[in-house]
Amino acid sequence: MNPIILVCDDDRLVLLSLSGELRRAGYEVIEADNGDDAILLARQHRPQLAILDVRMDGKSGMDVAAYLRDYVGTPFMFLSAFGEDGLVRQAAELGALQYLVKPIELSAIVPAVEAALSMARERSATKPAGGTATVDALIRAGTPESAVRPPSAEDGLIAIGILMERYRMTREAANNWLADLARRSGRTIEEVAAELVGQMDRWHSVDR
């Protein structure tokens, strides 16, 4: 039986696009455009993964994620238009498998879901239910062991989100960009990520 994926987003266009892409890949998809329906569907169908928007009317994606973690046991990832460090940190503390920033290429959704499902299986085999993810685990979701290790601190995840949002990069491309710059500059990936985040903070200060 193919995995069941719950997709929850209050943007109907996003919801239909994601669901269509996942169905074409062979997944069984259930849809919700609000948090309350997402919880009801999760209780009824027990999906193997939930893809959640963060900011929605009524229950937020974070509210839904906390319920899924505590009462249903459904692994979850976020797909959000917002990449603020506070949201990313909260997602990591809740135990999210991934945090992707919109807009994202549809072709990147299926690999991200496959990676999240693989990580969920590994987590269930090695950790008790309800354990939370570290920020490092959130960044590394789906990254092959043979690949360059991405950053392990909050700055790393924030930097990846910045690159994905500002330059329309995929998560893999953002990881590789940071790793390549680190190699060429003789610094660690963590140092490069922290510099990028600091630059963005300064730019935002100038804009204000």
Image (tube, helix red, strand yellow):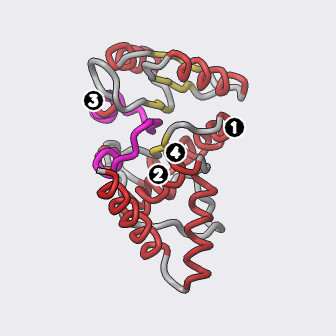
**Spatial CA span between label 1 and label 4:** 23 Å
For badge 3, the amino acid type reads Asp
> Which of label 2 and label 4 is nearer to you?
2
For badge 1, the amino acid type reads Ser
> Which of label 1 and label 4 is nearer to you?
1
The residue at which mark 1 appears reads as 107
Q: What's drawn in magenta, residue-wise? A: 63-91
**Spatial CA span between label 2 and label 4:** 25 Å
Residue 121 numbered tag: 4
Q: Secondary structure at mark 4?
A: helix
Residue 161 numbered tag: 2
Measuring from the top left, give residue 145's x and y in whole percent: 61, 65
> Which of label 4 and label 3 is nearer to you?
3
Residue 63 numbered tag: 3
Up-down relation of residue 38 to residue 174 (above or below): above
First in sequence: mark 3 or mark 1? 3
Q: Nearer the viewer, residue 16 or 2?
A: 16
First in sequence: mark 1 or mark 4? 1
Could you tell me which residue is drawn at 64 percent across and 38 percent down? Answer: 105
**Spatial CA span between label 2 and label 3:** 22 Å
